[in-house]
Amino acid sequence: MERLPRGRHGLSAEFVARNQRERLISGLTQALYEVGYHETTVSLIGQRAAVSKSDFYKHFESKDDCFVAAYEAAIERIRERVLTACEESEGRSWEERVPDAVGGLLDLFDEEPALASIALVEGLRAGRGVYDRYQAALESFVVILGRGAPRPPVGGDVPEATDEAVIGGITSLLGRRILAGEGDRLSDLFPEIVEFTFSAYLGGEEARRIVSAG
Amino acid sequence: MSPARPELPREFVASHKRRRMMDAIAELTAENGYEATKIADIVRRAAVARKTLYDNFDGKEDLFLSAIDAAVVELRVAVEEGCRADDGSSEAGIVGGLEALLEFVAERPAVARMCMVEAISATPSSARLYDAAMRDFVELFRENVPPGGDLPETIEESLVGGVAWILQLQIRRGEAERAPDLLPELSQFVLSPYLGVGRVVNGGGRRDR
């Protein structure tokens, strides 16, 4: 995020404050991506945001406080992107909507690997308070995924836990890749994630058929 | 003068105390979280002297990591045994392994919570232990799955991650004791990609419960 010009610039105080707050949020997100939660300090956040330490404390009580704000902002942006992708494919079948949603998510993560990292790795590392937010975020994706999900082609039922397990599986896979230092090319996993999702609902064979039919 | 009670072999007492300290930190972190758990609470719960704790461990984190390590080893042994059970088909093996996992969670809810929930956020080292354990269980799962044609290379990671997430939700809801109820659903979930949906019934048709 661009820092504002120094000195007299005729910008309103609220605008400056909001801009600073947003810079601090992306500063923290960036710092976490570089050094991880435990090594991130208020000074480092300030450096990345080009905001002084004393200004930091005008916006946040502590690193944790800023972290929670950054975490929520990250989740919100991710949810927005997925929902936008879903809206664009509104009215189409579940089998068509899944790749759009997964693609939207992975494109965002490729553009901003720091966002993927805070949402999928650092959020879990930060402790109990944030874990609830992580869980709530995943639950909201569970609802999106479950909407219009198919019944199995040959009798039997898709188990109730499938929606949740698929979301948990995708986020776990992405988190593990980020930890392995491959967070900047998550979109390479696009075909595998789509096929995994289909296979949980339709079986591996049917999943392969849909994926290769493109 | 003879001792008031018969003396137990020294190693027995020592390993029993280590075990009690590891159980204590599991219970306390499950109840209050890692951060809030103090050495004083641990020694009180384990009924050992403070000195005993420091004779055995470098401190709280070392004890915590040792407890996770020991639990993961036990869990792995139990799951491997479960995989070998029954008729030797890979379907029954997977269901057996999963059943062993769910029973472990139900029988030792505090330990399960320590390893699968608290470990992730407690310290960087405990998070690494969790990640390493996940890698091991992905490998174990991969060694035991039915042949599934050419499924994505990452399918096992996704499936094991999905199972872990479901268990984490169950533990955090305070329903670890009922984890075995999840066997039919989770068996279907992990086997669907290999066998097709709806082909696995009642947890793979294993023993009557």
Image (cartoon, grey):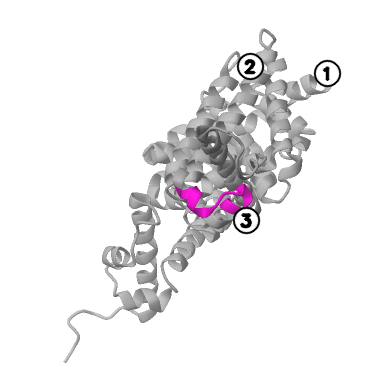
Alpha carbon distance from label 2 to label 3? 45 Å
SS for callout 3? helix
Q: Is residue B182 above or below residue A92?
A: below
In percent of width and height, residue B42 lies at 32, 64
Magenta residues (range): A45-57
Q: Is B205 left, or right, of A127 in this rendering?
A: right
* Depth check, front residue: B47 or A1: A1
Q: Amino acid at mark 1?
A: Ala
In percent of width and height, residue A61 lies at 42, 48
User: Label 2 belongs to which residue?
Assistant: A152
Question: Are labels 1 and 2 assigned to the same chain?
Answer: yes
Question: Are labels 2 and 3 assigned to the same chain?
Answer: yes
Alpha carbon distance from label 1 to label 2? 19 Å
Alpha carbon distance from label 3 to label 1? 43 Å
SS for callout 1? helix
User: Label 3 belongs to which residue?
Assistant: A35
